[in-house]
Amino acid sequence: MVFAHRCYADAINQVESVSFNEDIPDWNARGTSEPREMILITQSLKELQQVMSDYVGIVRNDVRLHRAMRRIDLLWEETLQLYETTALSLPLLELRNLISVGYLVVKGAAFRKESRGLHYNTDYPSKGKLVQNIVL
C-alpha cells in the first residue's frame, strides 16, 4: 500500500505536465465486415483456455510450455487475421487480450528455472527438503 500511494502521489504531480494529442482520428472500419461466424472467436477462446489448463497449469515442464507457446502463436495469427478483416467487437478484443496474457504467462513460466510455491516444473524440481506428515 505504501508503494501504491507513492506511485499515486508521483503520478498526480506528473500528469499535469503531460500533453495529450487531441488530434486522433476516428476509427476507420473501411474494408472490414461484421464477423459472420462468432464460432471462430468462441472456439479460439475455448482452445486458449484448454491450452493454458493442460500445458501451463500447476504442474508443468519445458515440453508442455513449448507446446503451449506454439499453440498460442497459432491462435494469435488466426485472431490477428480476424482483427484485420472484421469489425471490432468486445469478444474479439477480449480474445486478443487473453492471448496476450497467455503469452506472458507462458514466457514467465519458461524463464523460471526453479519450482517455488504453487507452480511446479518437473524439469526443475525444488531443491528444498520436502516436509511430509506435519501434525498440527
Image: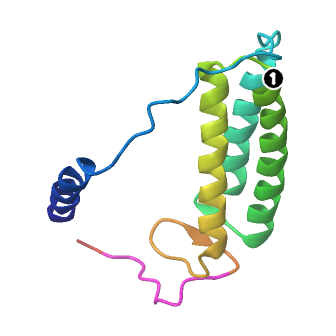
Residue sitting nearer the eye, 107 or 90: 90
Residue sitting nearer the eye, 91 or 88: 88
Q: How many marks?
A: 1
What is the span of residues highlighted in magenta in the rendered image?
Answer: 124-134
Residue drawn at the location 62% of the way across and 29% of the way down: 93
Would residue 15 be found to the left or right of residue 88 on screen? left
Q: Is 133 one of the magenta-colored residues?
A: yes
Identify residue for label 1.
40
Residue drawn at the location 14% of the way across and 64% of the way down: 2
Would residue 128 be found to the left or right of residue 84 on screen? left
Is disc 1 surrounded by few (<14), some (14 to 19) or many (20+) residues within 10 Å? some
- Tell me: residue 135, above or below residue 68: below
Give the prevailing secondary structure in the magenta stretch. Answer: loop
Amino acid of disc 1 = Leu
Residue 17 rendering spot, x and y as whole percentages: 26, 51
The local secondary structure at tag 1 comes to: helix
Residue 38 rendering spot, x and y as whole percentages: 76, 15
